[in-house]
Amino acid sequence: MVFSGFSTKDFDVFTIDGLDERMEALRERIQPKFQTIGEVLADDIAVMAGDEMFLHIAKHARRSKNPPKDTWLAICDDKRGYKKHPHFQVGLFDDHVFIWLAYINELADKPAIGQTLLNHIDTFQSIPDDYVISLDHTKKDAFQLGDTEEATLKQSLERFRDVKKGEFLIGRHIKADDPLLKDGNAFLQFAKETFETLMPIYHLSAK
């Protein structure tokens, strides 16, 4: 399968009522695209990281009632799972695509990784201003790096380090109506460039 881009119909999945109905649409419309995207990007990230990378596609298996508000693929260096590791994500909410380097609350060695990122906070100066930061992967909220004082970035990393449910994600958002999403090759290149930019941060935290 060749990835030809995301369509309005892909984002409309999140308007479908009912867990089973929405999950069926995700499996039919989104997950095949994630498989293609993930296979390409896993190879690219493996070269950049110098380590074998494995693709994981969110199954939302724990859900029994409420349909998912977003969905994603994850790429990391563990074949068995990604949540305990620093990992790369591409995913969708109803109004945007997100591209993340993600440290979520199930991360192993979270305090140590948080402290390492704090010790090398200058590394973030090389990240372009239009990149965004999220402190909760379940919410759409994110703030732009270019509008963020170093003190605020420091506080965000300290919260990630010290709070059990603290998270830290950095990357890019693309609005659902952005023409970039209609061009599969352009999107893949955009995602690759994003992960390449974030690779110095990943290397700080990788085992």
Image (cartoon, grey):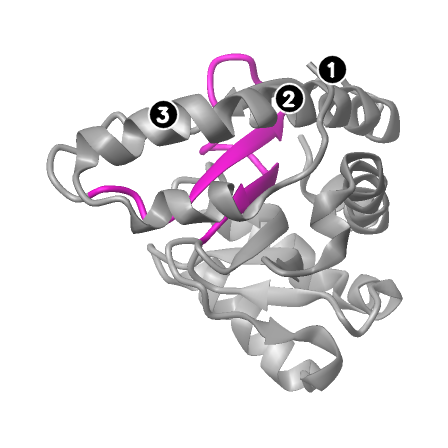
Residue underneath mark 2:
77
Q: Position of residue 202 (x, y in %)?
A: 73, 43
Q: Is residue 22 left or right of residue 117?
A: left
Residue 172 on image: x %, y %: 68, 58
Q: Residue at x 66, y 64 (%)?
A: 118
Q: Badge 3 local density, few (<14 within 10 Å), some, or many (20+)?
A: some
Which label's residue is closer to the chain start, 1 or 2?
1
The image quadrant that residue 51 belongs to is top right
Q: The N terminus appears in which quarter of the rendering?
A: top right
Inter-mark Cα distance, 1 to 2? 6 Å
Crowding around mark 2 (Cα neighbors within 10 Å: few <14, some 14 to 19, many 20+) is many
In the drawing, what numbered circle is on residue 59? Answer: 3
Q: Left or right of 109: which side holds 131?
A: right
The residue shown at (48%, 43%) is: 9
Three-letter amino acid code at the position of disc 1: Glu
Q: Is residue 98 above or below residue 203?
A: below
Q: Earlier in the sequence, mark 3 or mark 2?
A: 3
Q: Is residue 71 above or below residue 114?
A: above
Q: Nearer the viewer, mark 3 or mark 2?
A: 3
Q: Amino acid at mark 2?
A: Asp
Callout 1–callout 2 Cβ contact below 8 Å: yes
* Magenta-tinted stretch: 67-93
In this view of the protein, can residue 57 be seen by the observer?
Answer: no
Helix, strand or loop under label 2: loop
Task: Please report the residue visible at 47 percent of the width from the left and 28 percent of the height from the top.
Answer: 29
Residue extending furthest toward the left = 65
Pointer 1 residue: 52
Q: Position of residue 133 (x, y in %)?
A: 60, 66
Q: Earlier in the sequence, mark 1 or mark 3?
A: 1
Residue 169 magenta-highlighted: no
**Viewed as shown, does residue 96 lie left or right of 125?**
left
Residue 124 percent across, percent down from the top left: 78, 65
